[in-house]
């Protein structure tokens, strides 16, 4: 990727932080990058295209930064606690506010909406990879919809990041509830083989009954 493209994407993120999504233009981005605004259209066709590329770039950088720590998570509870730590780090860096700008812009920019969905999909895929490792051979493995759980975890943290801005105490309580859910899974981890087998059979029957009723 050319240095100019990189500079323009970095400048787009900086301009969003400075002016908000509504105040971003080819001119403001070019000024931030110290470049001719014609380069925005040369490399990205439209401002919308640049914003979409910048959103995906930001996601890629974060995944690269956090992947080693995600690989260290050994349980659902550890993964959820790590998510809370990452949330606090992202908030302190101003990236939670940046996410809010990107999601707000998605309503007005179709390409940015598509890129935001793709970015969330990248996070879900990363979390799914971790969950598959965590639940390999676990008594709950057959009862869990791991892809669905990965999307739920991703959606929960994105929603809580935005929720925290208007109700910090409520967001904190929600994070605590997620931690307790992880603790419940740890209780299952501690079951002996007989109890684990009985639980698995019960879950199978419940899933089969739900399937018939559905």
Image (cartoon, rainbow, N blue to C red):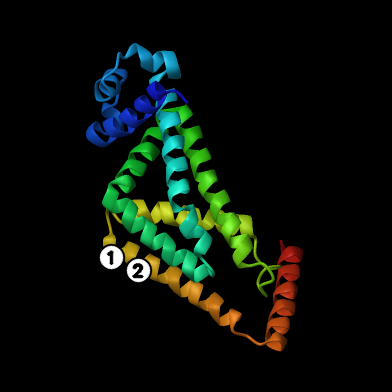
The outermost residue toward the front is 3
Q: Is residue 89 left or right of residue 180?
A: left
The residue carrying pointer 2 sits among few (fewer than 14), some (14 to 19) or many (20 or more) residues within 10 Å by Cα, namely few
Indicate the position of residue 23 as horizontal and vertical percent values.
26, 27
Secondary structure of the residue carrying tag 2 is helix
* Residue at which label 1 appears: 169
Indicate the position of residue 8 as horizontal and vertical percent values.
35, 25
Q: Nearer the viewer, residue 82 or 107?
A: 82
The residue carrying pointer 1 sits among few (fewer than 14), some (14 to 19) or many (20 or more) residues within 10 Å by Cα, namely few
Q: Residue at x 37, y 14 (%)?
A: 39
Q: Residue at x 31, y 14 (%)?
A: 37
Query: Is the Cβ of the residue at disc 2 closer than 8 Å to that at disc 1?
Result: yes
Q: Is residue 86 above or below residue 139?
A: above
Indicate the position of residue 99 as horizontal and vertical percent values.
36, 43
Tell me where residue 48 sits by quadrant.
Answer: top left
Q: Is residue 19 above or below residue 201?
A: above
* Residue at which label 2 appears: 173
Indicate the position of residue 137 as horizontal and vertical percent values.
69, 71
Q: Residue at x 60, y 66 (%)?
A: 134
Q: Is residue 134 left or right of residue 111?
A: right
Secondary structure of the residue carrying tag 1 is helix
| Disc 2 from disc 1: Cα separation | 6 Å
Tell me where residue 14 sits by quadrant.
Answer: top left
Q: Is residue 174 left or right of residue 76?
A: left
Tag count in the figure?
2
Disc number at residue 187?
Answer: none
Q: In the rendered view of the protein, which quadrant contains the C terminus?
A: bottom right
């Amino acid at each position: 990727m050319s240095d100019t493209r990189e500079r323009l994407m970095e400048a787009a993120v900086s301009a969003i932080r400075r002016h908000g999504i509504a105040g971003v233009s080819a001119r403001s981005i070019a000024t931030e990058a110290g470049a001719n605004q014609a380069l925005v259209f040369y490399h990205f066709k439209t401002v919308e295209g640049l914003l979409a590329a910048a959103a995906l770039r930001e996601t890629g950088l974060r995944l690269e930064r956090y992947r080693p720590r995600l690989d260290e998570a050994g349980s659902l509870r550890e993964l959820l606690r790590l998510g809370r730590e990452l949330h606090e780090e992202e908030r302190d860096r101003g990236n939670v506010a940046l996410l809010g700008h990107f999601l707000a812009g998605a309503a007005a920019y179709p390409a940015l909406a598509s890129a935001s969905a793709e970015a969330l999909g990248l996070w879900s895929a990363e979390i799914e990879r971790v969950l598959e490792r965590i639940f390999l051979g676990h008594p709950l493995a057959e009862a869990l919809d791991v892809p669905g759980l990965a999307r739920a975890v991703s959606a929960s943290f994105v929603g809580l990041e935005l929720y925290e801005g208007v109700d910090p105490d409520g967001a904190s309580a929600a994070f605590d509830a997620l931690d307790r859910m992880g603790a419940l899974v740890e209780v299952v981890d501690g079951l002996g083989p007989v109890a684990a087998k009985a639980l698995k059979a019960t879950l199978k029957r419940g899933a089969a009954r739900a399937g018939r009723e559905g």
